[in-house]
Amino acid sequence: MNARLDHRNLLIDGRPVAALSGRTFETLDPATEDVIAVVAEADQHDVDLAVAAARRALEGPWGRMRAADRGRILNKLADLIEQHGEEIAALESRDAGKPISAVLRQDLPAALDTLRYYAGFTDKINGQVIPARPDALTYTVREPVGVVAAIVPWNFPLMIGMWKIAPALACGCTVVLKPAEITPLSALRIGELSLEAGLPPGVFNIVPGFGRSAGQALVDHPDVDKVTFTGSPAVGRQILAGAAGNLKRVTLELGGKSANVIFADADLDAAVKAAASGIFFNTGQVCSAGSRVLVQDAVYDEVVERLAARARGVRVGAPNDRATAMGPIVSQAQMQRVLDYVDIGVREGATLVTGGARVGNRGYFVSPTVFADVGHDMRISQEEIFGPVVSVVRFSDEADALRKANGTRYSLAAGVWSRDIGRVHRFAKAVKAGTVWINTYGYTDVRLPWGARATPASVASTATPRSRTSPSRKRCG
Ligand code: NAD
């Protein structure tokens, strides 16, 4: 591994700096448990400096820059990330335990696509002239929200980081980003490249550290205008409460327990293949993972059998091996959480068809796991496990499928498989999910909205992989 990774600093006001406290923490390779790098640990004092730098940049060079020039810098950053693509992908793969092939195929292209999409927005953000009265010119002007705190999880550090940074910068905001403490490395590398691309000092600051210190300091900070967060519902609630102090704007994305619903008349080859990748992609650490597969009675046993066969065939291994399909869980704590859920499922009386165990004793690998005979009310059918564990639940008819699909506290995504065109569209309308995939699963695109059912729904099908209804909610800041 490159020696430059051994010690990494915060990025504040365009400069790599140690934490004021001098404290550091280690980031591990979840496939080997080796330390990859020692990282400066930000706390409230470093956050104060970062927020002050972001405020100065907002009111200084970034705020005064032509919108088109902001766009050019963001496009330059995208070009630099692309030029260093192999290096950044290797870093992400090692820090988060993601198969390198998946990072190169999915995470990196999606991050670049996001950045370029929003780079094109900078000079197309218009106000309106509103004819309120005849004796006055009345109009709106769109202003940046201000200093944005971006708090990022560990499951897609690069891609979700970019979902937050790119729209904020495109809109003229400045950013203080706190990566997850277990996956800080790709963000720090992007920070270096952002300076090379010409982002003025202070526009993009990075404060690696822990949620309870650096994260909470950002949330509580009186000079932060907005918090954008992806992670657990528990922390989401704390963020909402903390943000009330200065009435910050908040955007939250808190996960799911998405139903992938297979009717008896579906193309079972396609449905089972997608059901497997819907839960085993990224080791199941995906907010929209199809973690509940609902299957109609007549094909239930066949689907369980075929899904289990696919699970047994998933190539689990070292992330840097290009043939690996599934890497480790991101940390020991998350691995333990997943294994605890396997125990819960067995105790609840579900049938463990395959998997459910740690693989080897070095690295946090868990075998792809299929539970059958899962009752709709069981915890493994209701709670987000965030690992390669699928609960296969039986249903009798369309009404039963809908009741079960809608019967959790989540509403992020759903899939529906059937050859009956009337049924799939009826179901897509009735199911409580922000995104519904019809005869496909997992397709995402920065051009489409993303969020729980309270936001405009998007419907994608294999025939037309596009948003069908879309007053598109942009992920602004
Ligand atoms: P988490 O919510 O604790 O961490 C996510 C981010 O929030 C990290 O950067 C963390 O440092 C930060 N954070 C934690 N406490 C904070 C606080 N008080 N104030 C501000 N920031 C804070 O998630 P986790 O503990 O790493 O994972 C637990 C569970 O969360 C997972 O098992 C999964 O169910 C869920 N999760 C969901 C997503 C998603 O994509 N929706 C991503 C990661 C985790």
Image: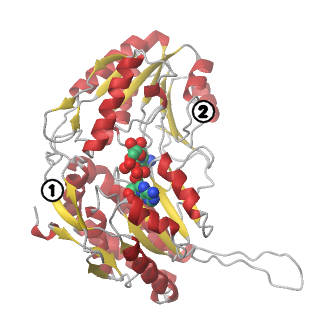
Residue 220 in view in this figure: yes
Q: How many marks?
A: 2
Please say which color scheme the image uses: secondary structure
Q: Quadrant of residue 38?
A: bottom left
User: Tag 1, which secondary structure?
Assistant: strand
Residue 35 image label: 1
- Which residue occupies 41% across, 38% down? 289
Residue 334 x/y as whole percent: 31, 42
Front disc: 2 or 1: 1
Give the vertical position of 289 relative to 131 (above or below): above
Amino acid residing under circle 1:
Val
Contact, CB < 8 Å: mark 2 with mark 1?
no
- Which residue occupies 28% across, 69% down? 188
Give the vertical position of 211 relative to 276 (above or below): below
Q: Which residue is mark 2?
A: 431
Amino acid residing under circle 2:
Val
Residues at marks 2 and 1, CA–CA distance in whole angstroms = 44 Å
Give the vertical position of 31 relative to 372 (above or below): below
User: Tag 2, which secondary structure?
Assistant: loop
Is 67 placed left or right of 306 in the picture? right
